[in-house]
């Protein structure tokens, strides 16, 4: 039992801040690089020759945000791979530098680990390892990435439901999964469920309130008309047409 715990600790420690020399990369490797000061990790599949196939937003900032919010900028094409950030969308193939560049900074490259121990998931940031096992050979991984590149058939980009980690994990295992957004996705689904339930209860409450409010108005008018010498009626005998007419008078 102690040996098993010790092995899990050792395997988990291997995941902590392990950087990769680009020269050691092999085709089919699932790699990632931190972006935005380490707030999230960007994933891709290394296909050899210094190139990576990865999944990016299918809409530009101009299509998502108002024009007044987006600062105009001229982004020159990469001299090595020809990638231009404002035009390249969806499944793309770029050089390693474009893959790991965040503005003017080049971030370190890391291996994404499959079959990680459960303890490793606690020691590492989300989006750096998975308990899933590799289901494809490196050649099959590269072929899957190229197939999605040719067809650009990975769908619309979604931050929690269909992102770069989903893409790379799918190429490796055939399963769309994202560890770094799983928690937020679960919270979002729970929020939507609670909001729908709240809306349903509110509609039911309004419906019941309208029903019972109309009954109370009818009871009040019956009592008022019973005491009126000109419109004397028996309690509970107010006709719908008369009720509507008198209710209209009160509203006017």
Image (spheres, rainbow, N blue to C red):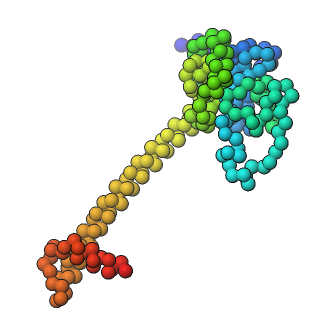
Residue at 71% x, 27% y: name it: 92
In the rendered image, residue 117, in percent from the top left (x then y), is placed at: 59, 19
- Front-most of 233 and 244? 244
- Front-most of 24 and 66? 66
- Front-most of 121 and 157? 157
Taking 200 as reference, is 49 left or right?
Answer: right
In the rendered image, residue 46, in percent from the top left (x then y), is placed at: 72, 19
On the image, which quarter does residue 203 sit in? bottom left
Figure check: 193 above or below 116: below
Taking 14 as reference, is 174 left or right?
Answer: left
Question: In the displayed image of the protein, which residue is found farthest to the left?
Answer: 234
- Asked whether the viewer can see residue 179, the reply is no
In the rendered image, residue 212, in percent from the top left (x then y), is placed at: 27, 65
On the image, which quarter does residue 134 sit in? top right
Figure check: 29 above or below 71: above
Residue at 56% x, 34% y: name it: 161
Residue at 37% x, 80% y: name it: 252
Question: In the displayed image of the protein, which residue is found farthest to the right?
Answer: 79
- Asked whether the viewer can see residue 54, the reply is yes
In the rendered image, residue 220, in percent from the top left (x then y), is placed at: 24, 76
């Amino acid at each position: 039992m102690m040996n098993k715990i010790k092995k899990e600790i050792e395997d988990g420690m291997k995941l902590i801040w392990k950087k990769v020399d680009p020269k050691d990369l092999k085709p089919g490797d699932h790699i990632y690089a931190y972006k935005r000061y380490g707030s999230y990790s960007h994933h891709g599949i290394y296909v050899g020759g210094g190139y990576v196939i990865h999944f990016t937003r299918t809409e530009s900032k101009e299509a998502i945000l108002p024009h007044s919010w987006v600062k105009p900028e001229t982004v020159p094409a990469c001299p090595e791979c020809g990638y231009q950030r404002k035009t390249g969308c969806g499944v793309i193939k770029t050089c390693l530098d474009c893959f790991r560049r965040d503005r003017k900074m080049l971030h370190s490259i890391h291996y994404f680990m499959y079959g990680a121990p459960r303890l490793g998931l606690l020691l590492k940031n989300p989006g750096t390892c998975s308990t899933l096992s590799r289901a494809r050979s490196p050649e099959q991984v590269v072929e899957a990435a190229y197939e999605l590149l040719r067809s650009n058939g990975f769908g619309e980009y979604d931050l929690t439901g269909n992102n770069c980690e989903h893409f790379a994990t799918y190429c490796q295992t055939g399963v769309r999964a994202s560890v770094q957004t799983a928690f937020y996705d679960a919270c979002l689904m729970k929020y939507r469920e609670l909001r729908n339930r709240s809306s349903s209860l509110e509609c039911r409450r309004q419906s019941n309130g309208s029903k019972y409010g109309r009954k109370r108005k009818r009871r009040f008018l019956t009592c008022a008309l019973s005491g009126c010498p000109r419109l004397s009626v028996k309690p509970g005998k107010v006709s719908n047409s008369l009720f509507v007419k008198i209710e209209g008078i009160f509203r006017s």
